[in-house]
Image (cartoon, rainbow, N blue to C red):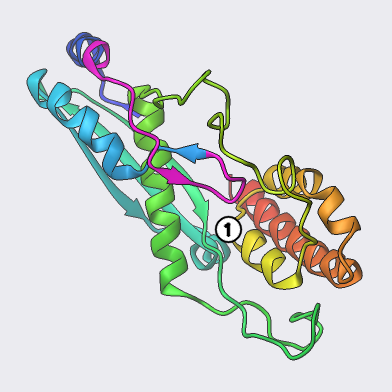
Amino acid sequence: MNKSPTVERLAAALTKAQASIQPAEKNGTNYYGEKYSELDALWSVSKDPLSENGLLLVQGNRVPDSPELAAAGVIVVTRIMHESGEWIESEIFVPAIRKRKEKRGLGADPDAEGQGQKPDAQAFGAANSYGRRIALQALLGIPGEENGSGAERPTGEQQPGRRGKSVQPMTVHRVRKDLASILTLRDVYAWRCKFTKEIAESPEKKAIQNVFNVRVEELKRIEQNQRQAA
């Protein structure tokens, strides 16, 4: 984290602001079926406490120094400034997931057909929004407003393939859609563990495994580029 030579007045003001920030509504749902706070919900609970304590939060982007990283994602820069001129700043790199051209046949390997990944402006925009949201919540320490018992998932909401009706077999189409939203190796393996039963019961399980393996290799390359650029 970068900061100004002194941060005493900023720290005092930020402490007061954080004390008055209320939990943000969890108004979004991710690919696990878990609730999270969208950017608008985070801003709704933070803008007044910040301004009342002489604080301003701004977010922008920086182009990565590495050409490989510049083509793979965005760097979101978040700075909190105090009226005294003091500031703190954080940066986070977020991979941008590109869409692939659709292939004929289930489980077709795009890399094997020489397609590769195609730049997608919408994917960069989504990565930017994701980075802004998690940076804002982390820097201000905004808690999410839990539902029911405060469990990770809202209580009373049926989770796919876990309770209630019989498990629905996984399809290649769904796998492609889910994996395109996953940005880290840790999360992609967590997704695989979560849907082990559905995948095992799917008539398309071999094709699904091929799609999964391709996504894992993509994320490995992205994370390797990040480590090399660090």
Is residue 62 part of the magenta span, yes or no?
Answer: no
Q: Residue at x 36, y 43 (%)?
A: 38
Q: Is residue 155 left or right of residue 8?
A: right
Q: Is residue 18 left or right of residue 100?
A: left
| Residue 116 image position (x, y, % from top left) | 68, 80
Q: Residue at x 82, y 54 (%)?
A: 198
What secondary structure is the magenta-colored segment mainly? loop
Q: Residue at x 25, y 19 (%)?
A: 21
Residue bearing the label numbered 1: 181
Q: Is residue 195 visible?
A: yes
Q: Residue at x 42, y 45 (%)?
A: 28
Q: Quadrant of residue 218?
A: bottom right
First to last magenta residue range: 18-34
Q: Quadrant of residue 215?
A: bottom right
The residue lying toward the viewer, choosing from 193 and 168, is 168
Q: Quadrant of residue 202?
A: bottom right
Image quadrant in which the C terminus is located: top right
Q: Is residue 62 left or right of residue 34?
A: left
Q: Is residue 139 left or right of residue 34?
A: left
